[in-house]
Amino acid sequence: MFSKGPTSHIPLLGSLLSDAIQASNQWKMEQRLGESTTDCLTTLIPEGQGEDISITLWVGRIEGLRMLDLFKQQPTWSALPKHL
């Protein structure tokens, strides 16, 4: 898992996320099947009104790694030492 990217990079997300989602295997499979919805975006809403919502995205591997580099995210946890 990676996080701790500079806050100044957040405005760069824009079309990067859209392009990265559309490069995912999940998106491509859904498009081949003619789906009008996608599971590339999932949202977890906790019960507490004051808690933040968690959004998970499925993105293409190459695009995801580019974003990781662009946002200079740091490793915070990984089950395997050489996961990447």
Image (cartoon, rainbow, N blue to C red):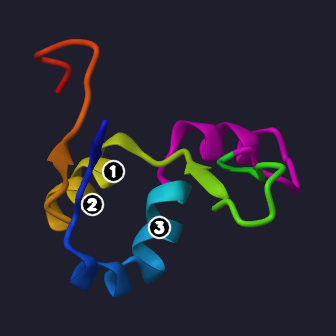
Number of labels in the image equals 3
Residue density around tag 3, few if under 14, some if 14–19, many if 20 or more, within 10 Å: some
Q: Are marks 2 and 1 in contact (CB under 8 Å)?
A: yes
**Disc 3 marks which residue?**
17
**Disc 1 marks which residue?**
64
Q: Where's the N terminus, which quadrant?
A: top left
Q: Amino acid at mark 1?
A: Gly
The span from disc 3 to disc 1 (Cα, nearest Å) is: 9 Å
**Residue 53 versus residue 84: which sits nearer the camera?**
53
Q: Secondary structure at mark 1?
A: helix
* Chain part drawn in magenta: 23-39
Q: Is residue 36 left or right of residue 19?
A: right
Asked where in the image residue 66 lies, by quadrant, the reply is: bottom left
Q: Is residue 33 magenta?
A: yes
Residue 41 spot, x, y in % from top left: 67, 52
Q: Are marks 3 and 1 in contact (CB under 8 Å)?
A: no
**Disc 2 marks which residue?**
67
Residue 57 spot, x, y in % from top left: 56, 50
Against 27, residue 16 (above or below) is below
Residue 75 spot, x, y in % from top left: 17, 39
Q: Amino acid at mark 2?
A: Met
Against 81, residue 14 (above or below) is below
The span from disc 2 to disc 1 (Cα, nearest Å) is: 5 Å
Q: Amino acid at mark 3?
A: Leu
Q: Secondary structure at mark 2?
A: helix
Residue 22 spot, x, y in % from top left: 55, 57
Residue density around tag 2, few if under 14, some if 14–19, many if 20 or more, within 10 Å: some
- Residue at the image position 46 percent from the left and 79 percent from the top: 15
Q: Are marks 3 and 2 in contact (CB under 8 Å)?
A: no
